[in-house]
Image (tube, helix red, strand yellow):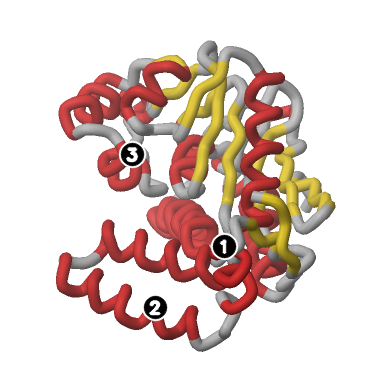
Amino acid sequence: MTDHIRQTLEDGILRLTKTNVESRQGVSLSVLAGLSAAFDRVRQSPEIRCVVIDAAGDGFHNGAVMLGELADDWNDLTPADYRKIIDLGHGVGRQIAACEVPVIGIAPTGGLGGGLELLCRSDLVYTTDGARFSFPEVTLGLVAGWGGTQWAGRLVPFRKAQEFLLLGEEIDGRAAEDWGLVTRSFADAAALDAHVVKVTERFKRCAPVSVKWHKECLRALWQKSLTEGEAVEAVAVPAAMETRAWFGPTAAFFEGKGWDYTKNEAIEA
């Protein structure tokens, strides 16, 4: 199977780039396998403090393209094949969402279908005003089944989610930001890239143990009741404090300074 995920690790940032340009960075079996292996690597590599997912070419995240990989003739596809597609997509999506370090999705020109569904699992998603986003499944006789109905349906106000998913129409990057589908939209790719640099630099000031537990508490916000979520917080606080990672940074804070967790030293605020 051709490797369609390029991995580069620099200064604690693991960049995962889809490189199957022939399918406009579509989500193939190779892409899913590559992403899955990469997030296994993150779990085993404490030096990685942030993951960035982007796409080669024009930076568009296309949908699933593995139908032809499972059968030469679509008539030969079986219910087991359909379920395999869903399970693979959900599996990688859960790896992204459960990652203990921040995951940033970059989509300069947008995404659709399965590509957009995996972006929805990222902690932060950045795009440009001219990007295009859609779930075209309803126009194809399919269902946005890698979490599109559930993740986009939670990120976006319900009435907007109904329109977005039931009509299968495109929205631009500005609307995607207004609706909450992406974190922020920028005028152009240069402004997007500059902001991502600022964000990854900012994560140097964020304690890895605190990021991990904040992500766990935010997951509880979606998945659990208020009482259950508060219980997660009650576990998170002592678990983070028991590491004593807060000693140096808190002392520096009272002196009007910040803390660089990559160097474990005080810095100017």
**In the figure, is residue 190 to the left or right of 243?**
right
CA distance for labels 1 and 2 = 19 Å
**In the figure, is residue 116 to the left or right of 42?**
left
x then y, percent, for residue 181 = 38, 33
x then y, percent, for residue 251 = 59, 71
Name the residue tied to disc 2. Answer: 237
x then y, percent, for residue 31 = 67, 48
Under mark 1, the amino acid is: Phe
Count residues near mark 2 (Cα–Cα under 10 Å), then give few for <14, some for 14-19, many for 20+: few
SS of the residue at dot 2? helix
CA distance for labels 3 and 2 = 30 Å
Q: Which mark is residue 178?
A: none
Q: Residue at x 57, y 84 (%)?
A: 244
**In the figure, is residue 226 to the left or right of 193?**
left
Name the residue tied to disc 1. Answer: 253
Q: Residue at x 42, y 51 (%)?
A: 82
Question: Which mark's residue is nearer the viewer, 3 or 1?
Answer: 1
Q: Is residue 186 above or below residue 239?
A: above
Q: Residue at x 39, y 77 (%)?
A: 236
Name the residue tied to disc 3. Answer: 152
Whichever of labels 3 and 1 marks the residue nearer the N terminus, that label is 3
Whichever of labels 1 and 2 marks the residue nearer the N terminus, that label is 2
Whichever of labels 3 and 2 marks the residue nearer the N terminus, that label is 3
Under mark 3, the amino acid is: Ala
The one of 209 and 167 positioned closer to us in this rendering? 209
